[in-house]
Image: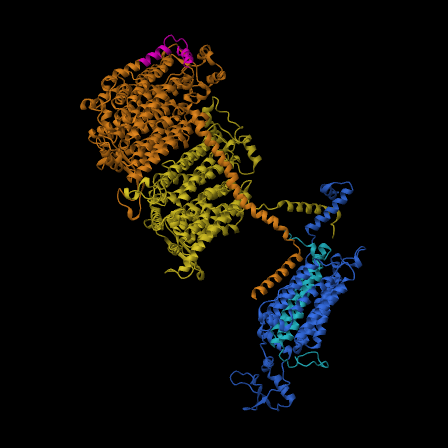
């Protein structure tokens, strides 16, 4: 990342010839990632709508993705990106399955309220 | 063949169990009978190729590597003691199958399959020369037994089965801790001939000799806790009456005949060799417990009204003698103890068989509802009196020799036990065998012989002798009309009546009541040839062991002498500390958790009503 | 909230990125904001909460930048970050699922922007295609499918469970404690992390692609006709030295010459990802494939399954039914059965 | 007994032993021989098996009886052969059967005194053995013959069962008597107990018979425990249970006893006889443990005659006699034996006086006579004891069989108030004469064998210093015995002819083969309400009921036994030194100083010699005991015969109320059964129930509690699992946060 601030850059991408990234820059991305993760978590914990809960898990996936890509960029290799692909896959699979289940559940109880399902209650 | 015969003894029942699972259910008894008989024949063959002159040595050894990296191997071998117990197990196999033919009418494939598996597991315990194999088999006996009790028992079977399982399982888990500790200790020692972990019993025994005395005490405590539950020793016995009462006949026979012996065998084979010094030290305490068991169990027998429970409690008392002999720690006591294992298996097993035969006919075990069956079933009564006498310990029958040897062993004081008044036996008289206990032990335990006579004669007095009493709806018109003038004719009259009955005439009320109470095949009043056939071998063995025990004595003397020497050397080496800590086995049991069937039943009902409702409304919410 | 660590070095690392005070203050503030912003029946609180949360986020990020002004990221980072986090906040705070999903798309797009900033073009577009294009559409479908018919008493057609957050305080506290702890750990550890690769490490893949090298060289005018990238005699590999940044060209039979690395010859992101994926982590692909297959099968199975009312629902309905029947003068299940016969 | 008396006794004992010359005849290794004796167990076991097979094949004839008689006769022949060929009569021989419990261990083992135990199925044949075996097998044969007729109503399964047990009994008895070690003796000991159990409970439908059988077995077991412990102690002290080794070892201590130095003998050795004694008292129905024998009369009469009068109950006497060397080693054992015997004799006699059931009277007289035998052993006349065993076997068997014949003929009637004048009924002469001879023997009528054997004991009691009190008590008992014996005779066999058939409970004994069952049915209808007005009713019954006289088998047996009961007196004069029995005892382990009469003559009324009122007991005892006997008979004559006109009453009835509580107590057997019940059975019963409760509540309760605790804990903390996704998620996230916090704080 160039040290100078160039608001007229044609491309927003800092690709081209990737220069080593400073730790502090990385810290910015990681912080964003952490905040997003926390928001996702809070959402998962507070929302009762099953679909939104799944959205929140997707948020957490995104947070993880940002962190992975940031590290990938920091280390100047592509391993992190590879794993983001993996995360994407899992997210897709999860979405497919989870949503199918949600539909089933909804049909049973006519409700998306997660609190309706407490069969594991001791 | 000769090399793998012991493994074959385990595999054959298993193979037949698998085979049985494939075949149609009507063939199940036949296949089970074939399997057990084949195993029994192989057992006979084993006995033939076994070198009885070297019975103190392990023979027919065979090792199949299993997990070499962990030192676990399928290692088998038998000495005289193990082989005798294996033979007992194999003998009881066909007997158990035969005695179940008419008693078990439902889910017979499951029944016979597990019976075969159980036999394999029990055989495995006795032939194991490897700790892991021993323990696996030891524990695996629980599963088939659990199934036999919980599926085929009488009214209270679930509770009995769960209690049996949890109780003995808890005990053996603690025993496992002790066993693993010994193995760990041995692995740490890396004695010559072993590399790292090993579960070879020989090596473990040699290694355990170096255990410090305090550790030995802990090991002994752990092992005893496991084995004492199985035996069962006095405070840990309460699962036994329940399990015995609820188990099907074959289950009771196996339980009394073999499973209880796993405990005493475990003490003899593992607890003593692993912790001889501690055993020598705590033997008096253990003997005290067994004596309490003898008297306490006996007295409880005396006031029982349930025939099967009586015999079950008598096992507590009898096994008390067995443990007493073992704690004596001398040759005579140990010999008596080992003999007791076999004899108790024969006589008490037979008693359970006899009670099962009665139960099959009258569907009651209540002594108040049964009486004077000698008039009705002379053959049964003859066997009953015979086996009761064997159980009482009548000389000339098997029970006596073992009982008297146990007591005689216990009678002999040791040099270092505080009974100096009785003299140092070893010095004075070369013939006697110094032991760990003293005369008082034998004298007090001897009272158990009297109590045994009391309760067993109470049993025969009520059930066999006396005026004929049958449960209402059974027999030839309820109460016997004899006893008034015609009494003298009764036996003859009834025997003819029985014959005609068996011949298919059917005596009205009896037939009707039978068909009314159950759809089981109608059994003749007295024993069938099949039933006589399963009792006769046991009776013959009881008599043979009582009159000519010499071969058996010589079959076990080598092992016994080794064990006695082990105890003696260990006992001589250790200095006797004063006020040593007590390793009292605490009662441990996970009481069965009653499954909360109510809620689900309600739900089912609701579902049922919904289903009904569906018919009305054409299905709600659809 | 959390105690400042006493370890000098760790503390120093933390201090070097962001003053702990600022961090924890921002976390506390953010927690308060998010707590307020979470859905609730009371109107008007949510925007205030959102504002507070935004302030807190801004405080933290600006604090971060202020402490590392030299290494501050691109301006676009701030734009994308604000959009992404703001979208995320709305995802969790919006009462209407559809809007939540739409805000999630916004978050996705902003995230894709961040990916672009991180020179992960492939991932950025893949994200948009897969997430915004596929997954979120599915979500929207499901939301449409699974929305209750609005009833009169419901608030603006919203379901009960969407109106109010569940245990918001506990959740925010847990979430922000986790955030604070995580950030602390990340910042502390970050000082010790050094980049593994250098500027050229991405070019390895180029060495495997002599054809592409020839094209670039030709475009640069270095490659003369008849010349090719020389191949190693033994291994058959092209003689392209990434470290020394030279390329050996061969013309004809044996004449070779060394040319310097042309500046425009760089590996593209897609190429890098492809190499990493195939070359380094082939297992990942396999596993991902299996997962997708399973998910597909699962989805098929699930959607094929006839839905049965479960026991509780059945009994509930049975109760209602019975009540209605008793009201009609019949009594108990027997009556129901009787009705069934009739 | 005071201490001084005791010490004088001890001294005498020592001196007597010294004089005897061969205190321990078992010192030398016994030779092998007497193999014929092994035939006895073989024959009898064969008999058992055959009878069992007869039962299995439902034989309905007298075949079991004839088989038994034949086999027992063969056994008797084998014993006679052994005796006649002199095997074991002078020195013991050992007939080795097979190894039974025989084992040695490891390197410790060596022959004989190994580190092990040897108890083989071998017979130790000496004179004592032969003495016992002669009358066991002989009487066994006779009584089997008798039973063949007596039990004929039960031909079939019961008949087979009876004779199987009968054979088994003789087998056990032969093991008991001929064993060459204490364990085989124990086998026989318990074996006869079993047969006793089976035969007492023969009429198993009668609850009283079952209870009596059980009581017999259990009381015997108490004694057996003592015996077992004694055997254990023998093994511990002497390293063996074989007679040859034990008595050889005991011989060492005899030397000390000889010198009167009992303090040199280990007290453990002195304890042995005290333990053995308990067994002997149990089997021979002595004082604390006698209660089973009277009840044992529930069994068929032949059983009472053979087992509970002639043979089995003398096993205790045999045991003491057999292990006499051990008893001699103990300072206290023999006096205890003497006193217990004497007190039992007296007690049983007093009870016998007050009973009305003739079989029970005989039972108590058996107890009493056994007391005599023990007293005889205790006062050092093993010869007298052995002789008394022999004579008693004959006359008591005779008495019982006569009673049995009466019972058989009168439908189980045993009440002496309901029978009278049997002598005068046709066909009952043999029974009556037999009864008279038996009674004469029992009451010590001069010149009967019973008279001589009782005299030997009485005289020796006075001879032995410190034992005079015993002598007086025994003399008193002799008088009482004479009274109650002839009470029976005068009431039942002479006087007016009156009879009443027995009640239905004894119906098992009699009915069936000749159509009496029908008559019986009507009789039984009258029930017990007859009371004392039975006199008139009796005649009515006589019209229906004809007592059937005994047949040839019973009569033959009675005749033989009666003859023997007279002829046996000749044994007293056979040979020197106190007759044949003394001769036999002399050559056995029961050997003692020569018979007291001769001993007195030889030693010239030595220094520590007791006296009877200043006279030589041996000389005067004939006359004294005769006089005492006559007094007893006279009293019985006066009270129960003279002037008696009905069966039910006699002059004695008037006397009973005057005796008040004493008579009542005696009639109730001094309430001993009740006391035992109250002191032992009831507490034990209560204790058992307490144990049962403890087992169910405490021991099992603890177990159940251990199972209850986890279940309850689970129940209590179960609500923590809400089942809600959020709950778990928040727990997970919070847990993660806390964990990280901990890591964070812990790392720094």
Quadrant containing the N terminus of chain D in the rendered view: top left
Looking at the image, which residue is at 53% across and 28% down?
Answer: B478
Chain given the colour blue:
C
x, y (%) of residue A12? Answer: 70, 78
Residue D740: quarter of image: bottom right
Q: How is the image coloured?
A: by chain
- In this view, the residue in front, C147 or C105, is C105
- In this view, the residue in front, A13 or B478, is A13
x, y (%) of residue B425? Answer: 30, 42
- In this view, the residue in front, D129 or B452, is B452
Q: Decide: is D472 above or below B569.
A: above
Left or right for C312, reference D459: right
Q: What color is chain A drawn in? A: cyan
**Extreme residue toward the right, this view:** C152
The reply to whether residue A77 is in sight is no
x, y (%) of residue D6? Answer: 28, 27
Residue D724: quarter of image: bottom right
Q: Decide: is B466 above or below C178.
A: above
Q: Which range of residues does the magenta coloring cover?
A: D631-659
Quadrant containing the C terminus of chain D in the rendered view: bottom right
Q: Decide: is A117 above or below D498.
A: below
Q: What color is chain B drawn in? A: yellow
Left or right for D232, reference B12: left
- In this view, the residue in front, B401 or C182, is C182
The reply to whether residue B535 is in sight is yes
Q: Decide: is D679 above or below B280.
A: above
Residue C96: quarter of image: bottom right
Q: Main secondary structure of the magenta part?
A: helix
For residue C1: magenta?
A: no
For residue D634: magenta?
A: yes
x, y (%) of residue A40? Answer: 68, 64
Q: What color is chain D drawn in? A: orange
């Amino acid at each position: 990342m160039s040290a100078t601030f160039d608001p007229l850059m044609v491309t927003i991408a800092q690709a081209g010839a990737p220069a080593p990234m400073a730790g502090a820059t990385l810290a910015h991305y990681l912080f964003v990632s952490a905040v997003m993760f926390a928001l996702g978590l809070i959402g998962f914990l507070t929302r009762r709508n099953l679909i939104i809960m799944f959205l929140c898990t997707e948020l957490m996936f995104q947070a993880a993705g940002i962190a992975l890509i940031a590290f990938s960029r920091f280390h100047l290799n592509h391993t992190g990106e590879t794993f983001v692909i993996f995360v994407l896959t899992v997210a897709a699979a999860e979405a497919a399955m989870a949503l199918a289940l949600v539909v089933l559940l909804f049909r049973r109880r006519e409700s998306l309220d997660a609190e309706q399902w407490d069969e594991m209650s001791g | 063949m000769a090399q793998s015969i012991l493994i074959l003894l385990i595999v054959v029942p298993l193979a037949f169990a698998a085979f049985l699972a494939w075949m149609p259910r009507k063939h199940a008894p036949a296949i089970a009978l074939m399997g057990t008989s084949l195993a029994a024949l192989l057992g006979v063959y084993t006995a033939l190729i076994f070198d009885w002159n070297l019975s103190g040595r392990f023979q027919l050894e065979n090792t199949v590597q299993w997990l070499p990296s962990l030192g676990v191997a399928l290692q088998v071998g038998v000495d005289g003691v193990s082989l005798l117990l294996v033979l007992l197990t194999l003998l009881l196999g066909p007997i158990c199958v035969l005695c179940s033919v008419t008693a078990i009418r439902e889910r017979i494939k499951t029944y016979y399959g597990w019976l075969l598996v159980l036999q394999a597991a029990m055989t495995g315990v006795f032939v194991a020369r490897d700790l892991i194999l021993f323990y696996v088999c030891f524990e695996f006996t629980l599963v088939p037994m659990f199934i036999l009790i919980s599926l085929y028992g009488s009214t209270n079977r679930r509770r009995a089965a769960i209690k049996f399982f949890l109780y003995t399982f808890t005990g053996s888990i603690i025993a496992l801790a002790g066993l693993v500790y010994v193995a760990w200790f041995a692995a740490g020692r890396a004695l010559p001939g072993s590399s790292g972990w090993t579960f070879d019993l020989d090596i473990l025994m040699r290694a355990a000799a170096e255990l410090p005395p305090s550790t030995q005490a802990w090991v002994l405590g752990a092992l005893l806790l496991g084995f004492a539950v199985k035996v069962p020793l006095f405070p840990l016995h309460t699962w036994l009456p329940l399990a015995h009462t609820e188990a099907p006949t074959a289950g009771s026979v196996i339980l009394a005949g073999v499973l209880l012996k796993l405990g005493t065998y475990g003490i003899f084979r593992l607890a003593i060799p692993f912790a001889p010094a501690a055993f020598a030290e705590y033997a008096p305490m253990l003997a005290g417990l067994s004596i309490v068991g003898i008297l306490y169990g006996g007295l409880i027998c005396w006031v029982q009204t349930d025939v099967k429970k009586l015999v079950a409690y008598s096992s507590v008392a009898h096994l008390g003698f067995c443990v007493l002999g073992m704690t004596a720690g001398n040759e005579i006591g140990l010999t008596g103890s080992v003999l007791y294992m076999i004899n108790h298996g024969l006589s008490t097993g037979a008693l359970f068989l006899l009670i099962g035969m009665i139960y099959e006919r009258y569907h009651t075990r209540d002594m108040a509802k049964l009486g004077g069956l000698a008039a009705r079933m002379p053959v049964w009564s003859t066997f009953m009196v015979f086996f009761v006498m064997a159980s009482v310990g009548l000389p000339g029958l098997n029970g006596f020799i073992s009982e008297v040897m146990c007591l005689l062993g216990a009678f002999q004081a040791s040099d270092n036990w505080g009974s100096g008044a009785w003299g140092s036996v070893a010095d004075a008289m070369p013939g006697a065998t110094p032991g760990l206990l003293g005369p008082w032990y034998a004298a007090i335990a001897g009272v158990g012989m009297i109590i045994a006579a009391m309760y067993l004669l109470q049993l025969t007095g009520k059930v066999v002798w006396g005026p004929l009493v049958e449960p209402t709806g059974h027999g030839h018109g309820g109460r016997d009309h004899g006893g008034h003038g015609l009494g003298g004719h009764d036996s003859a009259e009834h025997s003819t009546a029985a014959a005609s009955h068996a011949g298919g005439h059917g005596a009205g009320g009896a037939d009707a009541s039978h068909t009314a109470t159950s759809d089981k095949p109608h059994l003749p009043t007295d024993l069938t040839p099949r039933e006589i056939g399963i009792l006769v071998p046991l009776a013959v063995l009881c008599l043979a062991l009582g009159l000519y025990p010499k071969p058996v004595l010589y079959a076990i003397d080598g092992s016994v002498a080794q064990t006695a020497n082990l105890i003696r050397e260990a006992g001589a080496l250790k200095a006797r500390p004063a006020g040593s800590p007590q390793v009292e086995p605490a009662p441990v049991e996970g009481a069965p958790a009653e499954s909360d069937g109510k809620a689900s039943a309600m739900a089912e009902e609701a579902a049922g009503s919904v289903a009904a409702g569906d018919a009305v409304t054409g299905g709600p919410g659809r | 909230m959390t105690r400042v660590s006493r370890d000098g070095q760790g503390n120093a690392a933390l201090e070097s990125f962001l003053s702990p005070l600022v961090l924890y203050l921002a976390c506390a503030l953010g927690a308060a904001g998010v707590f307020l912003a979470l859905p609730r029946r009371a109107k008007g609180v949510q925007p205030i909460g959102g504002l507070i949360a935004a302030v807190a986020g801004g405080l933290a990020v600006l604090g971060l930048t202020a402490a590392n002004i030299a290494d501050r990221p691109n301006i676009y980072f701030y734009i994308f970050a604000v959009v992404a986090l703001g979208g995320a906040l709305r995802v969790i705070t919006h009462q209407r699922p559809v809007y939540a999903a739409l805000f999630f798309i916004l978050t996705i797009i902003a995230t894709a922007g961040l990916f672009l900033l991180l020179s992960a073009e492939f991932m950025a577009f893949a994200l948009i295609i897969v997430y915004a294009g596929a997954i979120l559409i599915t979500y929207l479908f499901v939301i449409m499918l699974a929305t209750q018919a609005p009833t009169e008493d419901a608030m603006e057609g919203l379901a009960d469970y969407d109106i109010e957050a569940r245990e918001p305080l506990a959740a925010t506290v847990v979430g922000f404690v986790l955030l604070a702890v995580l950030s602390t750990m990340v910042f502390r550890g970050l000082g010790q992390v050094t980049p593994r690769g250098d500027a050229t490490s991405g070019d390895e893949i180029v060495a495997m692609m002599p054809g592409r090298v020839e094209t670039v060289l030709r475009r640069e005018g270095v490659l003369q006709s008849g010349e090719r990238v020389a191949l190693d005699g033994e291994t058959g590999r092209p003689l392209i030295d990434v470290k020394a940044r030279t390329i050996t060209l061969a013309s004809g039979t044996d004449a070779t010459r060394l040319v310097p690395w042309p500046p425009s010859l760089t590996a593209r992101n897609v190429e890098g990802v492809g190499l990493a994926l195939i070359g380094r982590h082939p297992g990942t692909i396999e596993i991902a494939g299996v997962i997708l297959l399973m998910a597909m099968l699962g989805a098929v199975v699930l959607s094929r399954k006839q839905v049965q009312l479960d026991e509780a629902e059945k009994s509930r309905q049975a109760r209602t039914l019975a009540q209605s029947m008793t009201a009609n003068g019949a009594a108990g299940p027997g009556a129901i059965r009787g009705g069934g016969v009739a | 007994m005071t201490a001084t008396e005791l010490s004088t006794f001890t001294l005498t004992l020592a001196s007597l032993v010294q004089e005897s010359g061969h205190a321990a005849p078992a010192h030398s290794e016994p030779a092998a021989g007497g193999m014929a004796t092994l035939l006895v167990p073989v024959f009898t076991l064969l008999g058992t098996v055959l009878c069992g097979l007869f039962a299995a094949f439902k034989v309905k004839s007298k075949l079991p009886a004839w088989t038994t008689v034949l086999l027992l006769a063969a056994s008797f022949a084998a014993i006679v052969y052994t005796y006649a060929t002199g095997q074991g009569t002078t020195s013991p021989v050992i007939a080795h059967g097979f190894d039974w419990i025989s084992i040695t261990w490891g390197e410790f083992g060596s022959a004989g005194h190994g580190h092990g135990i040897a108890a083989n199925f071998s017979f130790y044949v000496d004179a004592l053995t032969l003495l016992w075996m002669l009358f066991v097998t002989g009487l066994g044969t006779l009584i089997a013959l008798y039973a063949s007729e007596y039990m004929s109503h039960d031909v079939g399964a019961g008949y087979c069962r009876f004779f199987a047990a009968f054979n088994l009994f003789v087998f056990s008895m032969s093991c008991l008597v001929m064993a060459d070690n204490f364990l085989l003796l124990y086998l026989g000991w318990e074996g006869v107990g079993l047969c006793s159990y089976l035969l007492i409970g023969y009429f198993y439908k009668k609850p009283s018979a079952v209870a009596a059988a059980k009581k017999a077995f259990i009381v015997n077991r108490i004694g057996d425990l003592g015996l077992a412990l004694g055997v254990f102690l023998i093994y511990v002290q002497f390293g063996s249970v074989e007679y040859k080794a034990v008595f050889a070892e005991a011989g060492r201590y005899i030397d000390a006893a000889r010198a009167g130095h009992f303090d040199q003998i280990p007290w453990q050795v002195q304890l042995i006889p005290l333990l053995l004694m308990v067994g002997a008292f149990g089997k021979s129905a002595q004082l604390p443990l006698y209660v089973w024998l009277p009840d044992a009369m529930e069994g068929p009469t032949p059983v009472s005659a053979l087992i509970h009068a002639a043979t089995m109950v003398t096993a205790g006497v045999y045991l003491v006699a057999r292990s006499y060397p051990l008893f001699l080693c103990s300072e206290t054992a023999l006096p205890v034996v003497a006193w217990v015997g004497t007190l039992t004799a007296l007690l049983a006699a007093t009870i016998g006086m007050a009973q009305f059931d003739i079989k029970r009277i005989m039972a108590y007289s058996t107890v009493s006579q056994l007391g005599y035998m023990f007293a005889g052993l205790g006062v050092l006349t093993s010869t007298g004891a052995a002789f008394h065993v022999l004579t008693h076997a004959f006359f008591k068997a005779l008495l019982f069989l006569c009673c049995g014949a009466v019972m058989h003929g009168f439908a189980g009637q045993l009440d002496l108030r309901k029978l009278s004048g049997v002598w005068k009924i046709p066909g009952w002469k043999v029974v009556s004469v037999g009864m008279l001879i038996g009674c004469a023997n029992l009451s010590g009528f001069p010149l009967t064998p019973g008279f001589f054997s009782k005299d030997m004991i009485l005289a020796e009691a006075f001879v032995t210093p410190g034992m005079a009190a015993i002598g007086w008590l025994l003399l008193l008992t002799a008088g009482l015995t004479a009274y109650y014996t002839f009470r029976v005779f005068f009431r039942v066999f002479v006087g007016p002819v009156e009879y009443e058939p027995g009640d239905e409970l004894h119906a098992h004994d009699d009915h069936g083969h000749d159509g009496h069952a029908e008559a019986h049915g009507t009789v039984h209808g009258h029930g017990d309400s007859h009371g004392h007005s039975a006199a008139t009713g009796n005649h009515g019954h006589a019209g229906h009921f004809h007592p059937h006289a005994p047949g040839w088998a019973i009569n033959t047996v009675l005749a033989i036994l009666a003859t023997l009961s007279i002829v046996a007196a000749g044994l007293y004069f056979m040979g020197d030194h106190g007759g044949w029995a003394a001769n036999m005892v002399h050559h056995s382990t029961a050997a003692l100083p020569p018979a007291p009469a001769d001993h007195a003559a030889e030693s010239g009324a030595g220094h520590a010699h007791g006296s009877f009122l200043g006279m030589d007991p041996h000389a005067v005892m004939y006359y004294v005991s005769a006089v005492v006997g006559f007094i007893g008979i006279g009293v019985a004559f006066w009270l129960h015969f003279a002037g008696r006109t009905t069966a039910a009453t006699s002059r004695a009835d008037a006397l009973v109320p005057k005796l008040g509580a004493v008579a009542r107590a005696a009639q109730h057997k001094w309430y001993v059964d009740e006391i035992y019940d109250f002191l032992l059975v009831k507490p034990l019963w209560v204790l058992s129930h307490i144990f049962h409760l403890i087992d169910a509540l405490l021991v099992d309760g603890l177990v159940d509690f251990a199972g209850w605790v986890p279940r309850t804990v689970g129940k209590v903390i179960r609500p923590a699992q809400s089942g809600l996704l959020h709950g778990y998620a928040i727990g997970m996230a919070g847990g993660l946060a806390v964990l990280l916090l901990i890591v964070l704080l812990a790392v720094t």
